[in-house]
Image (cartoon, grey):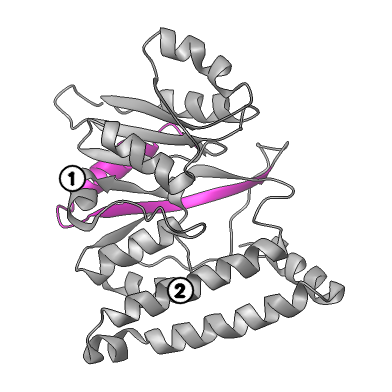
């Protein structure tokens, strides 16, 4: 059972025109068994009914609401972090959900491992409209020293699974607002490249919503994504020593990404390849 002496956790939710989902996200945050926590929603310039739906929570003091002109998800997260008071920062995307024990289990995990800057966990996937039918992606999750070399090759850390110490943002910086994609992946790589530690908690404590037309299904968006990945990897390589370049196999990661980029560029112009790519995306189940 949690006690008031436990560290405050700030659950931050970026929101942009997600009136259909924001209440689910907020309710899942408020249902946490852990205490104390605060919920901060950054409204990133929404033009829909997001704020109207949040009004009862704001009026009751259950949610802190911050509005800003649209800056993108990295900017929305950074704004929430600047307004956060917690020792721990938990990320929750506005169309995803936490399970009730998520914060309790991850804070306990980090308290037991003081060297841990970021804790992440497993995540259930569900299609929009069927939240009770969940499945897992066919991913391998890594912990400690194994995270960096494998994260260079593949993003397997969903941002909604992340709980980070506030000190991680103070030491390594916030999310890169110049990136249109992969800002959470870049943040994790930056923490690791500068000596930080990421540990995996082997429990499934969150749910990620897959929406039709989202980046999970768009080949065109994935081409843009891979271009950003290349930029991040090349930039990261510049700051590495020759020994570090060899030990992390970053050159292999850059080459593999270039191959995927070429394939996706072909797929964007050739329907059978695009269909194959979508099939692969939809069949990565465990």
Q: Which circle's residue, 1 or 2, is located before the other in the chain?
A: 1
Q: Is residue 42 above or below residue 199?
A: above
Q: Residue farthest to the right?
A: 271
Q: Residues within 10 Å of mark 1 (few under 14, many from 20)?
A: few
Q: Is residue 56 above or below residue 266?
A: above
Locate residue 131, reporting x and y percent. Answer: 66, 37
Locate residue 165, reporting x and y percent. Answer: 23, 46
Residue labelled with disc 1: 111
Residue labelled with disc 2: 231
In the picture, the quarter occupied by the N terminus is: top left
In the picture, the quarter occupied by the C terminus is: bottom right
Q: Is residue 150 left or right of residue 214?
A: left
Locate residue 33, reporting x and y percent. Answer: 36, 26
Bounds of the magenta segment: 98-127
Q: Is residue 277 left or right of residue 40?
A: right
3D distance between C-alphas at marks 1 and 2: 35 Å
The numbered mark at residue 211 is none
Residue 283 seen by the camera: no
Tell whether position 180 is magenta. Answer: no
Among the 4 quarters of the image, the one containing residue 9: top left
Q: Residue at x 22, y 52 (%)?
A: 168
Q: Helix, strand or loop at disc 2?
A: helix
Q: Is residue 206 left or right of residue 17?
A: left
Q: Residues within 10 Å of mark 2 (few under 14, many from 20)?
A: some
**Front position in the image: 195 or 282:** 195
Q: Are marks 1 and 2 in contact (CB under 8 Å)?
A: no
């Amino acid at each position: 059972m949690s006690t008031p002496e436990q560290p405050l956790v700030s659950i931050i939710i970026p929101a942009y025109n997600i009136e259909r989902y924001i209440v689910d996200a907020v309710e899942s945050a408020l249902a946490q068994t852990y205490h104390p926590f605060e919920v901060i929603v950054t409204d990133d310039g929404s033009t829909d009914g997001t704020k109207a739906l949040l009004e009862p929570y704001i009026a009751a003091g259950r949610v802190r609401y911050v509005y800003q002109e649209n800056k993108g998800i990295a900017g929305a997260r950074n704004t929430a972090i600047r307004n956060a008071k917690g020792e721990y920062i938990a990320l929750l995307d506005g169309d995803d959900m936490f399970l009730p024990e998520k914060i309790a289990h991850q804070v306990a995990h980090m308290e037991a491992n003081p060297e841990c800057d970021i804790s992440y966990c497993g995540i259930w996937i569900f299609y929009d409209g069927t939240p009770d039918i969940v499945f897992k992606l066919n991913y391998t999750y890594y912990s400690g020293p194994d995270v960096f070399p494998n994260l260079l090759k593949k993003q397997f850390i969903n941002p909604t699974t992340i709980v980070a110490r506030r000190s991680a943002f103070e030491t390594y910086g916030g999310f890169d607002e110049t990136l249109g994609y992969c800002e959470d992946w870049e943040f994790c790589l930056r923490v690791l490249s500068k000596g930080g530690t990421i540990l995996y908690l082997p429990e499934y404590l969150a749910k990620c919503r897959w929406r039709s037309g989202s980046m999970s299904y768009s080949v065109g968006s994935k081409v843009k994504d891979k271009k950003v990945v290349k930029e991040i990897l090349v930039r990261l390589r510049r700051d590495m020593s020759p020994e570090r370049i060899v030990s992390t196999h970053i050159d292999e990661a850059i080459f593999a990404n270039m191959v995927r980029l070429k394939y996706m560029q072909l797929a964007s112009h050739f329907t059978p390849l695009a269909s194959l790519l979508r099939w692969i995306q939809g069949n990565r189940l465990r």
